[in-house]
Image (cartoon, rainbow, N blue to C red):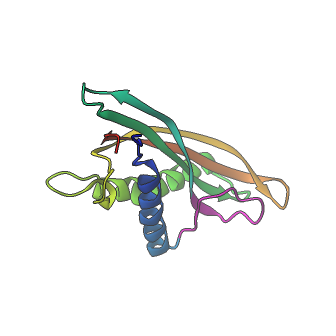
Amino acid sequence: MATLTSSAPAAYAALSNLLDTACTAAGVPFFTSEILQNQPPAYIFLEALDNHSFTIEGMEYTYTESYDITGSCRYVAGDVGGNTYINIMNETYTLFTTIVMQTVVENRGGNGVAVLGITSYPSPFEIKAGFARYQAIPGNFGGGQAGWQGVLDWSFSLRAYIAPQ
């Protein structure tokens, strides 16, 4: 009986480790589970593995595995005047571009370099930016609304060739 493996767990773990390292270097908290209280003023959250699918590619039963890894960047500000929304948006996008995007771009593979540094089978052959959705919402301090927060949800799409073993 053949077993169909998946590159998704290794890719999720690799991206989690790379983001954790980048966040530590930048002094930004990194989480892989929901924050229920004591929300830090800025953080990055790796959320889910979505849209996982397998498509037959040939008569030898080779599959293309496709999936998305999703997360978010959040920046929370107390009651501040002036250009609150613009400042919060700029800070949120700074988290996204300098930590998340930079980490993925530096580990996107190509020219003999493995995607996300994964060298064991199965490994993804491609990672592409999916979406980035920004919104400003009320902040939550001590269980009540105070200030504002920027939330930028993001995704990356990955693909791998998989063959039953």
Name of the residue lying farthest toward the front? 1
Q: Percent position (x, y) of residue 160?
A: 32, 42
Task: Count up the numbered dots.
Answer: 0
Residue name at image x 33 percent, y 57 percent: 116
The quadrant in which the N terminus is found is top left
Whether residue 17 sits left or right of residue 92 in the image: it is left
> Residue 21, how many percent across, how many down?
44, 70
The quadrant the C terminus occupies is top left
Nearest the viewer among 75 and 105 is 105
Q: Is residue 60 above or below residue 1?
A: above
Residue drawn 48% across the image and 67% down it: 20
Q: Residue furthest left?
A: 111
Q: Position of residue 147 (x, y in %)?
A: 74, 54
The rendered magenta stretch, by its main secondary structure, is classed as: loop
Give the vertical position of 87 relative to 60 (above or below).
below
Give whichever of 60, 100 is nearer the camera: 60
Residue 37 is covered by the magenta coloring: yes
Residues rendered magenta in the picture = 28-44
Spot occupied by residue 157 in the image (x, y as percentages of width and height): 40, 40
The residue shown at (31%, 40%) is 163
Does 123 appear in magenta?
Answer: no
108 and 123: which is toward the camera: 123
